[in-house]
Amino acid sequence: MELIEAIKTRKSIRAFKPDPVPRSVLQEILEAARNSPSWANTQPWEFAIVTGRQLEEIKKGFLELGTTGSNMEAGRPPEFPEPYISRVRSLGQKEYGLIGITRDNKEGRAWWNSQNFHNYGAPCVIYILIDRAFHIHEKGINVWPVYDCGLISQTIMLLATNYGLGTVVQAQAVIHPEIIRRVIGIPDSKLILIGIAIGYPDWAEKIASFRSDKEPLDKLVKWYGFA
């Protein structure tokens, strides 16, 4: 697949088939992704790739806790100011509309929110980790490893499209890091930044074809020094 096609094709998938992703395919993706750039070539990323019984155990623990007691280690904004909150709400409204959940359907909304903890049916999750001491130290916060992990996350997702795979980056996949630590034995010296659900899209589900709106370029860019 051409790079420009992969960039335009990639989107967040929220309906996956249960078919397992071969370890060999995941290894090829990560082998290529490790060429991603990083600040001063620090390469701060590490990966925990989970499937099968252990992933099911993580899902069960997340479903039991729900959104209570969130302990996301990378932090999250206490609120979304404008224009960001409007984009968040627009995304949610369109998702609910596509799957036929009305505004007053509390049970339906709760069910859809719970699908986050099911990783939308994805059979595998790639958790991205960094050293705690490299990110948080006595002189302040080092933002660069988080930035660099964003770069390699994008590379992983673009590469996945080449194998017919879909992905979705999930903050909800790491809001209970203590459960992930317990199940797969991640030490406290590592921060669990984000989870990327990965698998084969279930195109039979309407939500799999959903694409979020993007802001027009003219709203995002100012040009300087051009004739």
Image (tube, rainbow, N blue to C red):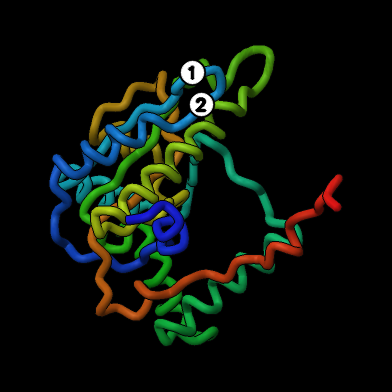
Kind of residue indicated by mark 1:
Thr
Rendering coords of residue 203 (x, y %): 27, 75
Report the residue at 54% width, 84% height from top.
103
Q: Count all numbered tags in the image, as a single digit.
A: 2
Local packing at callout 1 (Cα closer than 10 Å; few below 14, some 14-19, many 20+) is few
Image disc number at residue 134: none
In which quadrant of the rendered view does residue 167 lie? bottom left
Residue 159 percent across, percent down from the top left = 33, 47
Q: Give the residue number, with chain letter if any, for mark 1.
A: 42
Picture layout, residue 202 above or below residue 196: below
Q: Which residue is mark 2?
A: 38
Look at the numbered discs 2 and 1 and tell me whether their residues touch, using CB distance below 8 Å.
yes
Name which residue lies at 61% across and 28% down.
Answer: 143
Amino acid of disc 2 = Ser
Q: Secondary structure at mark 2?
A: loop
Residue 17 is situated, as x and y percent measured from the top left of the image, at: 20, 66
Q: Is 98 situated above or below 150?
A: below
What is the secondary structure assignment of the residue under circle 1?
loop
Q: Report the front residue among 16 and 8.
A: 8
Q: Around disc 2, counting alpha carbons within 10 Å, would you say few (fewer than 14), some (14 to 19), or many (20 or more)? A: some
Please tell me in which quadrant of the rendered image residue 110 appears: bottom left
Quarter of the image for residue 137 reads top right
Residue drawn at the location 60% of the way across and 66% of the way down: 214
Q: Which residue is depicted at the point 42% across and 34% down? A: 192
Residue 54 relative to residue 63: left or right: left
**CA separation, marks 2 and 1?**
6 Å
